[in-house]
Image (spheres, rainbow, N blue to C red):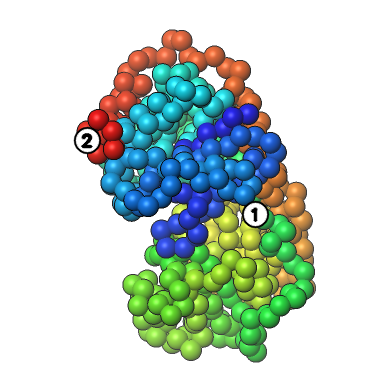
Amino acid sequence: MRIAMVSGHASPLSEPGGDAGGLNVYVARLAEELAARGHDVTVHTRRDAPDLPARVALPGGVVVEHVPAGPPEVLPVDGLLPHMGGFGAHLARVWAREGPDVVHAHFWLSGLAARTGVRPHGIPLVQTFHTLGTGTGGPPERAGAERLLGRACRRALAVSTDEADALGALGIPARRVSVVPCGVDAEHFHPAADTGRTPERRQRHRLLACGRLVPGKGYDQAVRALAEVPDAELLVAGGPPAGAVAADPEARRLTALARRTGVADRVRLLGAVPPDDMPALLRSADLVLCTPVHEPFGFVPLEAMACAVPVLATDVGAHRDCVADGSTGRLVAPEDPAALADAVRALLAEERLRRQYGRNGRERVLRHHTWARVADAVEQVYRLALPEPAPATAPSAPDDRLEGLAHVGAGGHDGHP
């Protein structure tokens, strides 16, 4: 198939960290896996720097196209809506010359642009929202746009059962929704003994938390729980480089909290950790803590499970799909440091159980969460989208409203007349 992915603000060329995160990883790895199967895959992302080439061909065969839409600079996500009309108009022109078989949009803003691009040509659209405005907020136009996009696309692909339920609440028929959880590179993240330098181990048990250094990741809950686990240390990996992490606002907040709760000597903020070093760091932990209030992807627990490390995760979002409670780890209530501390103490006291959870986690990853498994399922979704005829009796209002929304404030800012 000729597959076009639209990922307006999350380029597959961006390294995770800072503003780049799970969506960048998802798009990059899915595109790479599909290209490895012989599909022709192009990812369309917004040009956010003036010196970016129009096209970048990656070694695995994926092509990244930088679309002129708005000023060529990094913009906040909530400021991108006025430029989606220009983005979509560019796609419509490109696809008039040679259109893809299927278009897969990631996030609601990308969906607006993709809908504008496919509509003149009747190209089937698959939409993945990844997060929904009903749970995470955003501009006032977002909730309505997501409802209309869900009805206008040929198939909706949800990355968790929670997201699928939320799509149903928006009025999207269940028959058009497919759940495909996220994947992990099980060759990079693995439980084998390290051949290189292993991170220093201390006499204390090691708890590890990973991800972007932002309040939503719930690291403060792990710090508070640590006060009730006296024989453990907490390492937090993520954020700016190690030399700059002390100046980061979230790092300062966590450091102050650690002082107030009397655990400053047992909390280490590592800053950004190179990807090649992450498997060894994960394997050095007795438990990996994943404590966000909202989680659309679940990459960190999957990476830990692939390394045969047990996981304690909040009972939210994608965690419910990837962490098998009582088998690969434990699920605990969000924003409840006392419950988190109780679960940590119970598992640290049971080394044999932790090892069993680790083995179970690795097996679960290999059965359900490799990128090959994800690509298998996504291919099926694409094929389900292909044979269905475009709706002939759909009301015109949703399309007209989407078109208008995608062009809000777009005049003169997309690099085209």
**Residue type at tag 2:** Gly
Observer-nearest of 125 and 302: 125
What secondary structure is marked by label 1?
Answer: loop
- Identified at 35% across, 77% down, the residue is 247
Relative height, residue 412 to residue 330 (above, below)? above
Please give the name of the residue rendered at 59% of the width and 22% of the height, measured from the top-left corner.
386
> Where in the figure is residue 154, as x and y percent of width and height?
51, 24
Query: Which callout, 2 or 1, points to the residue nearer the camera?
Result: 2
> What's the amino acid at mark 1?
Val
Tell me the residue that label 2 is attached to: 412
Residue 412 vertical placement versus 306 (above, below): above
Residue at 22% in and 35% down: 412
Q: CA distance from mark 2 to mark 1?
A: 41 Å
How dense is the environment of label 2, judged by Cα within 10 Å: few (below 14), some, or many (20 and up)? few
Residue 149: tell me if it is visible.
no
* Callout 2 touching callout 1 (CB < 8 Å): no
Residue that numbered label 1 is attached to: 184
User: Residue 368: percent from the left, percent from the top?
Assistant: 71, 47
